[in-house]
Image: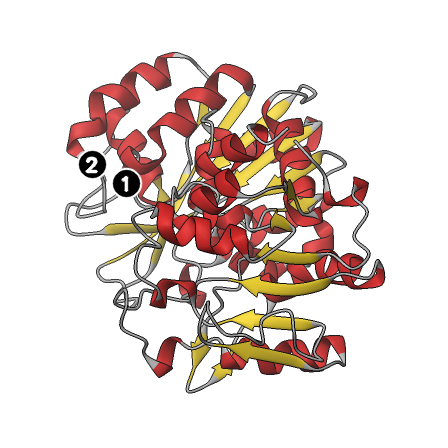
Amino acid sequence: MNNLSELVLENKKLIIRVDMNVPIVEGAIKDQTRILASIPTIKHSLDRGAKILLVSHLGRPSEGNPDVKFSLQPVVDSLKIILDEEVELVSELSDPLIFNSSARIQVMENIRFFKGEKSNSEELGKCLASLCDVYVFDAFGTSHREQASTHSAITHSNQACMGLLLQKEISALTKALNEYENPYTAVIGGAKVSTKLELIKNINEKADFVIVGGGIANTFIKAAGNEIGISLYEESMIDIAKELLDGGKIILPETVITSLSFEGEEVTVKNICDVGENEMILDQMLTRKMQDAINVSKTILWNGPLGVFENQLFETGTRDLSKAIASSIAFSIAGGGETISAINKFIKADDVSYCSTGGGAFLEFMEGKDLPSIQALKSKI
């Protein structure tokens, strides 16, 4: 794939597809992580004399129906402060001011306001591609979506390349997927085995230890023959969980925190064998075996919490896991919204070797799938 860092950018018009789908409440951005992740690519391009049009989606507006609550204006305001420079919002792809303004940075209004984005319209893709000299794709978090700004525009561009963020993502994830060192520990949490089954299967072939958490752990606990009360689990995944348990790599909890409700009615710490029929497992304690696995590992993949850590009553497992990974000497890579939230709550992003900006894209990449945007970039060589 072509790299932005290898191109001559002076006087070039760049469209950079970024992922600035940030949480906004009453016009205020609550987490700037995705914006900040895009800054190195933006600065690199500006420093080399390019003019930039940023393209991103935000939320899930009705296609072709602009809605002010999904406007990128708050992102524009944030960029002005971060970059200390004028940033201009443009609302139409036919706007004559695109690349003809005094502003070096422009932001196209939410790309999902335009018809054809979600359907990977050739017309919209060609329109985007025609506006620029180079189409830079730097939105790893959207690379699993075959849409106009993430696929068609790349395909129809005269020249396309990956941005600095995408380059970092691919390098870090490839290291955890194909260039890892053993011992290798994978931590896979979340609500459902079914949503992460391909990840579990793929990583189970590479990892030496697999720690499961959340509703996923409950399914494995039940598959092992234990009572889980009214805990979240998937009956349809029990047989698959048994097969994976037979492989001997899955590490199950020994001590859990239960409650009669998600709100914390009658919270109890107990052995996994003592869970009552009317209880639900909402957290799990880090076992000695889990701690030892993390301590000896040279590679750690982390995707998902061990419990409902948003509630202080059920944060112990995820907190202790976070600190154990932070103390590890392993190359550690974390991905997924809940995982990043846990890192921000209990440790620091710098305590992990790499924090991916992707959710669904992270999962699909680690499952070994070819992502549409990356495939399109490879075709432009």
* 226 or 45, nearer to the observer: 45
Mark 1 in CB contact with mark 2 (< 8 angstroms): no
Q: Do we see residue 353 in this rendering? A: yes
Q: Quadrant of residue 48?
A: bottom right
* 144 or 198, nearer to the observer: 144
* 236 or 308, nearer to the observer: 236
Q: Residue at x 46, y 85 (%)?
A: 27
**Image quadrant for the C terminus?**
top right
Q: Amino acid at mark 1?
A: Asp
Circle 2 packing at 10 Å, graded few (<14), some (14-19), many (20+), is: some
Q: Which label number is shown at residue 274?
A: 1
Give the answer, above or below, for where 153 lies relative to 287: below
- Residue 364, horizontal then vertical, whole percent: 44, 34
- Residue 307, horizontal then vertical, whole percent: 40, 51
Q: Amino acid at mark 2?
A: Glu
Q: Which label number is shown at residue 234?
A: 2
- Residue 295, horizontal then vertical, whole percent: 69, 32
Element on which disc 2 rests: loop
Element on which disc 1 rests: helix
Q: Residue at x 60, y 49 (%)?
A: 135
Taking the image as shown, residue 102 lies to the left or right of residue 315, namely: right
Q: Do we see residue 292 in this rendering? A: no
Point out the residue furthest to the bottom here.
Answer: 26
Q: Quadrant of residue 297?
A: top right
Q: Quadrant of residue 105?
A: bottom right
* 21 or 316, nearer to the observer: 21
Give the answer, above or below, for where 314 lies relative to 200: below
- Residue 70, horizontal then vertical, whole percent: 38, 75
**Image quadrant for the N terminus?**
top right
